[in-house]
């Protein structure tokens, strides 16, 4: 039995211990939330050859990626150029060097502008394939040496218009994944089928994925042009661009060699089409020229601008492009003041195409009232109803007609010999500028007597072929056509349109024109009797515009 003094001491010690413990709990530091993890490190690989035309917009897309620049390393290489690619790339790298984690630039001193066994700049001889494969392998080796988490390969004419593309591809948690890129055709940066020799094979699965009818991240046998590789994956260590795998026996081709390497390493390729990620041009044939490559990229750029705002790199000094009116007296673009988006898109597109225009304010039919119509002397054609929907003329159609009518009066007042009229919702077909120039040169050379040439229309009488204009290619005598997206108007054509005095017997403009050249299939005698002027002499090229 403990003595009283010992028991008291033990009790005091327990009390002191409990007091000290509770006091310590009160004095503990509050638990703070941990800071977020740094984003994974990414190396972006830029391989450029004769890319002066595409680099400003390609690099602009790289700059606008929604990803911390200090977590991105840039690895760039260029050679065998016949223009200013090397200087442009070097200028950009020198200006962005402090923004990114690191910058590596590789070029060849006193380089040749072509490969020894190359017949043209778009041909791919074995020497070119081998050189590109070695460059990709060098970039891959550099990324591994820098302990990069990912490496992004993106061809220098691919436009990554979705700023979130890097983060979204990483979130897929795949070793090898590509964003699906779009073009003006069904061409894209993936295959759904492959032959036993490693070549492209058509499959039923391709079109639903390409057209985004089936969205997701799809397992495919081939991705190329732009792709993200997760270097943290163990299997990624077995992937190589050069040399080709020892069992590879097919044609020497960089994407086929890498695809085979992935299969041998047990790495599945994926392509994602959850969103619109960007655009790429359709590949050219080996005999095509650099000028044709520039035209192809310009079309890719204008197509992309229909959906997104694209600006060139902030860090490049790019002189403004020379613009012209293509030998027209004037080029008018009709635009509603409230449609600022269309105006800005057209301005950017026309800048890329090098076309000088005059914007003319469209008449807003919604703002017209009965008093204004009366003051302008506007009356509907008696008995007119739309031939397909059986309705009367709308205010929007009145505004549209007046917008075109105002241009016709300007053409006559200024004695403009030939004028191009465009609406602001057009999209340009490939080689638009050169094709239209060629057509107008042919017209002049043939001394064709003409009033109006459609360059953007919807042909409605498709059951019967249109007859060709004798001695001219790409020009037909049009049948009933709809829409006035674009047309060339001569001075005598403008005079004929105004001599018809159309405001007092108004029709929609795209119904009025077929009546004027006697090709309206549902024109009643009452309609024809109101327009007793000499018919328009009219032609239509195989359309440089489309919707």
Image (tube, rainbow, N blue to C red):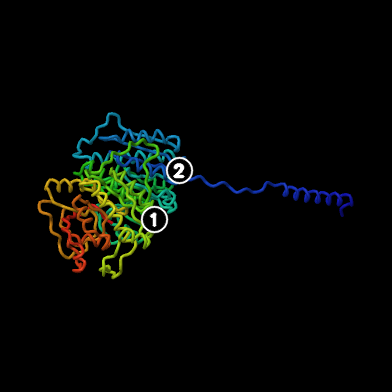
In depth, the one of 3 and 71 nearer the eye is 71
Mark 1 lies on a secondary structure that is loop
In depth, the one of 237 and 70 nearer the eye is 70
Q: Residue furthest top?
A: 110
Instruction: Classify residue 336 as left or right of residue 471.
Output: right
Which label number is shown at residue 198? Answer: none
Can you tell which quarter of the image residue 116 is in? top left
**Comes first in the chain, label 1 or label 2:** 2
The answer to whether residue 269 shows anywhere in this view is no
The residue carrying mark 1 is: 275
Question: Mark 2 Cα within 10 Å, few/some/many (few <14, many 20+)?
Answer: some
Q: Residue furthest left?
A: 471
**Residue 93, horizontal then vertical, whole percent:** 39, 35
| 86 up-or-down from 541: above or below | above
Quadrant into which the N terminus falls: bottom right
| 93 up-or-down from 309: above or below | above
Quadrant into which the C terminus falls: bottom left
Which label number is shown at residue 41? Answer: 2
| 212 up-or-down from 326: above or below | below
The answer to whether residue 10 shows anywhere in this view is yes
Instruction: Classify residue 238 as left or right of residue 203.
Output: right
Question: Mark 1 Cα within 10 Å, few/some/many (few <14, many 20+)?
Answer: some
Label 1 and label 2: CA atoms lie apart by 24 Å
Q: Are marks 1 and 2 in contact (CB under 8 Å)?
A: no
């Amino acid at each position: 039995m403990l003595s009283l003094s010992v028991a008291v001491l033990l009790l005091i010690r327990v009390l002191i211990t409990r007091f000290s413990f509770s006091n310590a709990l009160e004095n503990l530091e509050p638990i703070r939330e941990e800071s977020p993890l740094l984003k994974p490190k990414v190396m972006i690989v830029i391989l450029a050859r004769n890319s002066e035309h595409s680099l400003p917009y390609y690099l602009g897309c790289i700059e606008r990626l929604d990803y911390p620049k200090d977590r991105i390393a840039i690895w760039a290489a260029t050679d065998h150029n016949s223009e200013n690619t090397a200087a442009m790339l070097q200028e950009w790298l020198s200006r962005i060097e402090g923004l990114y984690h690191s910058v590596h630039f590789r070029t060849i001193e006193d380089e040749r502008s072509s490969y020894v066994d190359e017949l043209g700049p778009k041909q791919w001889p074995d020497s070119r394939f081998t050189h590109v494969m070695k460059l990709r392998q060098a970039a891959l080796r550099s990324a591994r040496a820098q302990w990069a988490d990912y490496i992004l390969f993106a061809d220098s004419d691919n436009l990554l218009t979705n700023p979130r593309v890097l983060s979204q591809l990483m979130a897929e948690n795949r070793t090898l994944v590509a964003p699906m890129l779009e073009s003006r055709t069904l061409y894209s940066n993936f295959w759904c089928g492959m032959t036993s020799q490693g070549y492209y094979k058509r499959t039923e699965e391709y079109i639903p994925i390409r057209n985004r009818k089936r969205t997701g991240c799809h397992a495919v046998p081939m991705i190329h042009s732009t792709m993200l590789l997760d270097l943290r994956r163990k299997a990624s260590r077995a992937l190589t661009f050069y040399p080709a795998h020892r069992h590879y026996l097919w044609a020497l081709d960089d994407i086929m060699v890498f695809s085979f390497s992935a299969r041998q390493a047990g790495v599945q390729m994926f392509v994602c089409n959850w969103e619109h990620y960007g655009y790429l041009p359709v590949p050219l044939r080996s005999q095509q020229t650099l000028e044709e490559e520039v035209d192809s990229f310009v079309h890719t750029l204008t197509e992309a601008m229909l959906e997104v705002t694209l600006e060139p790199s902030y860090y490049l000094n790019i002189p403004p492009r020379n613009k012209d009116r293509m030998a027209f007296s004037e080029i008018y673009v009709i635009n509603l003041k409230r449609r600022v988006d269309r105006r800005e898109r057209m301005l950017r597109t026309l800048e890329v195409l090098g076309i000088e225009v005059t914007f003319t304010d469209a008449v807003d039919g919604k703002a017209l009232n009965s008093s204004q119509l009366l003051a302008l002397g506007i009356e509907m054609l008696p008995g007119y109803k739309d031939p397909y929907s059986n309705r009367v003329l709308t205010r929007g159609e009145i505004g549209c007609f007046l917008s075109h009518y105002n241009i016709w009066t300007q053409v006559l007042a200024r004695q403009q010999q030939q004028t191009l009229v465009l609406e602001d919702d057009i999209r340009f077909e490939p080689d638009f500028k050169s094709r239209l120039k060629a057509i107008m040169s042919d017209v002049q050379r043939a001394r064709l007597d003409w009033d109006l040439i459609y360059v953007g229309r919807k042909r409605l009488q498709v059951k019967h072929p249109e007859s060709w204009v004798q001695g001219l290619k790409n020009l037909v005598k049009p049948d009933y056509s709809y829409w006035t997206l674009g047309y060339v108007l001569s001075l005598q054509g403008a005079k004929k349109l105004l001599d018809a005095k159309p405001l007092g017997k108004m029709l929609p403009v795209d119904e009025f024109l077929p009546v004027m050249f006697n090709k309206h299939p549902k024109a009643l005698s009452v309609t024809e009797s109101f327009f007793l002027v000499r018919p328009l002499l009219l032609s239509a090229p195989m359309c440089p515009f489309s919707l």
